[in-house]
Image (spheres, rainbow, N blue to C red):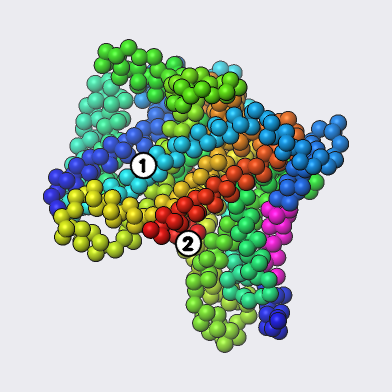
Amino acid sequence: MIQPVQRRNLGIALLFLAPNLIGFLLFTLGPILISLGGSFTSWSLKPSVPLRFVGLQNYVDLLSDPNFYFYLYNTVYLLTGLPISIAGSLALAVLLSSRLNLQTSRAALILSLTAALGSLPVSGILMISGSGSTAFLVLALGVITSLGLYFNSIGYRTFYYLPHFTAGASTILLWMQLYNPSFGLINQSLLALCEFLGIPFSPPGWLTSTRSLLGFLPLPAHFNNGGFGVGAREAIMIMTIWASVGGNNMILYLAGISNIPPELYEAADIDGASGWQRFRHITFPQLAPTTFFIVVMGVISGLQGGFEQAKLMTEGGPAGTTTTLSYYIYTQGFELLDLGYGAAVSWVLFLLMMGITLLNWRYGNRHQNQ
Amino acid sequence: MNPSGSLFRHFGLVIIAMIMTLPFLWMVGTSIKPHHEVESLSLLPSSPHPENYAIVLRQSPDPYTGKLLDLDFPKWYFNSFFIAGWVTFLQVLTSACAAYAFARLEWPGRDRVFVLYLGTMMVPGMVTMLPAYQIMVSLGMVNTYQGLIIPSAFSAFGTFLLRQFMIGIPRSFDEAASIDGANHLQTFIEVILPMSRPGVIALSIFTFLGNFQSFVWPLVMVRDDHLRTIPVGMLSFQGLYGQQTELIMAATVLNVIPLIILFVVMQKQLISGIQLGGVKG
């Protein structure tokens, strides 16, 4: 039964909804339906291919496409950086939430000013004596220490969050330079360090290498496995961890920690619990809903990820080792112009995401109820 | 609590902050190096070479070719702000209107339509990209500003975020407004929208940032250099001047600076926005 008020509201509601609804139908729901329908056709941008219904052919092709499994493996392999990143976010949040205030605000101010003013003459002297790099580092160290001592967790949070906030094409190109095998900062530093320690060392090829940490596994030949070592996939993982460890996950953990009732810790103190026990039995279980949310969101975005890195850094290489499913969809659609097949891959990706999310849901909820 | 324990923690936090910041320090240092010093391990050049910025901004010629760069970085810069600005304005506007309809009005079928909105949020962007491109082809919007702005002006996520915000506002405010003779448009603009301010600000930051940095859609939508935004522009920069690291780093610094300013200025609103989306989403 629809009441007259509700019916009158329908008109008003439609007026409010109209601009959004038109866009939603045209650019979200419409494309979703076209994509689903198109995945059952020979949809192509090549004029030589006529559009016709092919049934499940695209999906059958996909399941017998060795590249699909290779790129699925790459996508899932890149996801293994996620637990490291989440553990890092949690550790940072716990550290930032711990007591950082010095005895008095005056002591903090004095120490902060000492760090700021102290780093100036030191870096000045270093600059004059010709080691500009060290001077630059000392100056940065002084600024960070000074801000951290004065603003405590908010000061540090800013520095940790910046890689996430600025993440994009530019920072990907920045890392591409850092990873340059011969003159990139990373390999040069590693070489200098090993020379100093007297260890013989041949640095990894990073983005040019097909090695991986799982390279010792007997993977199929078309996975272009370069053996055990550090290669392009690890390079992308490290960059992703750098960009995400201090990002939204850390912010969510900080909020979660601040919502834990202090009585729990007070009770633990009375029982004489150690720092680890407090974390193990209070902090971590109390944060379970946050962790659950972060894992679900991380898996969803991780399975769709890797496009920008592949497009900007590696073109999916070397030998396809950094091609993820999203990059595969792009190349199928916009380079090979085979939209039907690309759409089929994207729907299989969607099913994978849904499946893992539902598993997470069941497992995660059971875990939370205990 | 002993102060040495907290000093020890500060020490650890400073070290981590240094590691996180090091790539940015290298970026700034390299952006002011002359070309022949790029490969040295030193973070800073022997003497600063800020001309790199003038070259990237097309104020002085590239020393290798003797003419201005073929790529119009200043135009990309303008495009990025122009497009992200319009998208943010339109998306917040359409999302707020729709959120009002979902949160404050009762009409038949409301919850089913809302579930449909929610459901589409689960679908990966790659699914809609190919057909959305085809739709833009048939609308004749490929390679235009409209093609970059209009598809992003509507968002199920934005509608969802603001609806969550508006649903928390007590009913009595609408009733009071209605007793004062306000119609729905007046209630929306004068009561509900101001009360949703934190949500609107958070959505604005998310939308602006997401669009300013968006890569895939401008990549497929734009053919001409003068329509490029910074992220896709950087791809052609890498392709044409990939050997001139110092220029790429100068461009990167110019890309990152407005983001750092935005972050420092909006930090408080942004953090509460993330926590809001995370806790309620």
Counting from the top left corner in percent of width and height, residue A209 is at: 50, 20
Counting from the top left corner in percent of width and height, residue A20 is at: 67, 61
Magenta segment range?
A14-30
Q: As drawn, is A120 to the left or to the right of A13?
A: left
Whether residue A160 is situated above or below residue B174 in the rendered picture: above
Q: As drawn, is B90 to the left or to the right of A277?
A: right
Image quarter in which the C terminus of chain A is found: bottom left
Task: Same chain for labels 2 and 1? Say yes or no.
Answer: no
Q: Say which residue appears at 42% left-offset and 46% top-offset.
A: A247
Q: Chain of mark 1?
A: A
Q: Residues within 10 Å of mark 1 (few under 14, many from 20)?
A: some
Splitting the image into 4 quarters, where does residue B71 fall? top right
Q: Say which residue appears at 49% left-offset and 77% top-offset.
A: B170
Splitting the image into 4 quarters, where does residue B238 fall? top right
Q: Main secondary structure of the magenta part?
A: helix
Image quarter in which the N terminus of chain A is found: bottom right
Counting from the top left corner in percent of width and height, residue A279 is at: 27, 51
Q: Residues within 10 Å of mark 2 (few under 14, many from 20)?
A: few
Residue in the foreground of this view, choosing between A100 and A133: A100
Q: What amino acid is found at the position of numbered circle 1 in the picture?
A: Gly
Whether residue B260 appears in magenta in the rendering, the answer is no
Whether residue A23 appears in magenta in the rendering, the answer is yes
Q: Which residue is mark 2?
A: B280
Residue A126 visible here:
yes
Counting from the top left corner in percent of width and height, residue A91 is at: 32, 45
Q: Say which residue appears at 65% left-offset and 70% top-offset.
A: B110
Q: Which residue is mark 1?
A: A88
Q: Chain of mark 2?
A: B
Badge 2 element: helix
Q: As drawn, is A118 to the left or to the right of A258?
A: left
